[in-house]
Each structure stands twice: as structure tokens, then as C-alpha cells.
Amino acid sequence: MSTVSVPTFTRKLREIVADEPKAFAYDLGLSLSAVYNYLNGRIPATEVLFRIARYAGRPMEWFLVEDEAVAAVGGLGEVTVDERYVAAPGGGDGT
């Protein structure tokens, strides 16, 4: 199991924020001081991290673990579903 990497979080958040922390804060409904706290190593609460992830179009885990750790477990968001559990075309009632 991977642990949360604060340097990874700040590096990836800086990629998303770029040179626009004020616009980023406004878009997410955050204070500018909160954004600077996150850019300087504070990990946000789950709700805020979820909003950041949605804004960036990335899963929350992407912000928290190194890319090598993600590759070791087969990537993020990849799930194998047994064929018998896949919904049949035309509805879920089996008809």
C-alpha cells in the first residue's frame, strides 16, 4: 500500500494551479490563503481534494501518490469486472 506523499501533492497541485492561484481559488470557492497553504505542503480536507480533482479532471489518488507507485498497482481507475456482472444491453432487468 502506498503512503501519501506531501511533495508529490504539492508538485502536482503546482502543475494544475500554474501561475494562476487567484483564479484557481476563485474557481473552486477557496480563499487565496488556503490555496497558498496547499501549495506549501498542507493536504486539504477530503471534500476540498475532491473538488480539486474534479477541476483537474484527475482522480484524487493522482495527487497523493508517486507515479511509480501507481504504475506498480496497474494504474489508477482501472478495474476488472467479471463478465457475468456486466450489464446486458437494453436494460438491467435481464430481459
Image: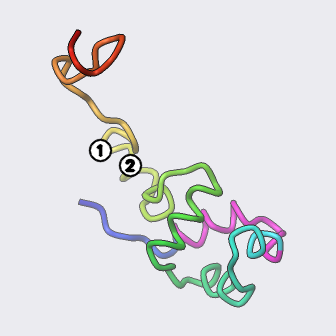
Quarter of the image holding residue 88? top left
Give the camera-side residue of 17 and 6.
Answer: 17
Question: Which residue is pictured at 33% across the width and 38% down the height?
Answer: 74
Question: Which residue is pictured at 65% across the width and 86% down the height?
Answer: 34
Residue bounds of the magenta highlight: 8-22
Quarter of the image holding residue 11? bottom right
Give the camera-side residue of 79 and 69.
Answer: 79
Q: How many marks?
A: 2
Give how far across and how far down residue 43 sits, in percent.
Answer: 49, 79
Give how far across and how far down residue 8 sits, in percent.
Answer: 51, 67
Question: Which residue is pictured at 39% across the width and 42% down the height?
Answer: 77
Label 2, residues with CA under 10 Å away: few <14, some 14-19, many ≥20: some
Give the camera-side residue of 61 and 23.
Answer: 23
Q: Which residue is mark 1?
A: 73
Horizontal side of 61 relative to 54 (left or right) equals left
- The secondary element bearing badge 1 is classed as loop
Q: Taken as a whole, is the magenta stretch helix, strand or loop?
A: helix
Q: Amino acid type of disc 2?
A: Val
Q: Is residue 49 above or below residue 83?
A: below
Q: Amino acid type of disc 1?
A: Val
Q: Which residue is mark 2?
A: 70
Whether tag 1 and tag 2 are in contact, CB under 8 A, the answer is yes
Is residue 16 one of those drawn in magenta? yes
Q: Is residue 94 above or below residue 46?
A: above
Per the model, the C-alpha gap separating discs 1 and 2 is 6 Å
Q: Mark on residue 47?
A: none
Give how far across and how far down residue 55 sits, in percent.
Answer: 65, 57
Q: Is residue 37 above or below residue 90?
A: below
